Amino acid sequence: MNAPEPFLGVTEHTPVRHHILSVLVENKAGVLSRVAGLFARRGFNIYSLAVAPAESSAKFSRITMVVDAETTPLEQIVEQLDKLVNVVAITDIAPKDAVERELLLATIRTEVNSRTPLSDVVANSGAAIVDVDAHSITVMLAGTPKACDLLEAQLEEFDTIELHRTGRVAVPRLGTSASA
């Protein structure tokens, strides 16, 4: 039996379980460690974490986290984050109001004469081949978490050497307001 995708989204029968927090922090040594430590000490679970410099400024970084809002109230998570000195701003992006993407990179062992099935999976999933050698192909998909889950499941029938996923990044959809 396949496990369901961790993010359940909004449906008539299923409440939102995960929330996306976009946290703008000072780009200083130890900030990510303090944020992760806060979550560990409080027993909060982080399902996905992505960090990169924010905008064009080297002064700030943006941490995008998908957090479990079912076991710990979102307000409590935000309050605890807001107490950290290096946190500049916190934005809660409701999943229904977010544009989310994730990157999947996978290197698959394959010989030159048996690449057609893998090429078909890549073409049908919207992925791209980004590296090829005599014994392997590396594929990439930048897509929704669900699209990455589907490709990952399809790649299980192949001899995967390595598979990596970045974690989600998100921005609010135009015309929606995220809370800070």
Image: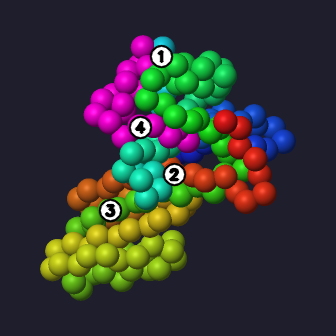
Residue at image x 52%, y 38%? 23
Of the two numbered discs 1 and 3 in the rendering, the one whose residue sits closer to the viewer: 1
The quadrant the C terminus occupies is top right
Q: Is tag 4's residue or tag 1's residue first in the polypeptide sequence? A: 4
Residue 110 at least partly seen: no
Residue at the spot of label 2 = 169
Task: Look at label 1 and name its amino acid.
Answer: Gly
Q: Amino acid at mark 4?
A: Glu
Of callouts 3 and 4, the N-terminal one = 4
* Residue 13, visible in the rendered structure: yes
User: Which label was assigned to residue 133?
Assistant: none
State the extent of the magenta-drawn residues as a range.
22-41
Q: CA distance from mark 3 to mark 4?
A: 32 Å
Mark 1–mark 2 CB contact (< 8 Å): no
How crowded is the residue under tag 3: few (<14 C-alpha within 10 Å), some, or many (20+)?
A: many
Q: Please state which amino acid type lies under the numbered disc 2.
A: Val
The image shows residue 17 at horizontal and vertical percentages of 66, 33
Q: Marks 1 and 2, Cα distance to the nearest angstrom? A: 23 Å
Instruction: Tell me, yes or no, whether the highlighted magenta stretch contains residue 109.
Output: no
Q: Label 1 neighbourhood size at 10 Å, few (<14), some (14-19), many (20+)?
A: few
**Residue pointed to by mark 4:** 26
Separation of disc 1 and disc 3 at Cα? Answer: 32 Å
3D distance between C-alphas at marks 3 and 2: 19 Å
Tag 3 near tag 4, CB within 8 Å = no
- Place residue 104 in its image quadrant: bottom left
Measure the C-alpha gap from mark 4 to mark 2: 18 Å
Disc 3 designates what residue?
A: 106
Q: Nearer the viewer, mark 3 or mark 2?
A: 2
As helix, strand or loop, the secondary structure at mark 1 comes to loop
- Please name the residue that numbered disc 1 is placed on: 43
Examine the rendered structure and indicate whether residue 87 appears above or below residue 99.
Answer: above
* Disc 4 versus disc 1: nearer the observer: 4
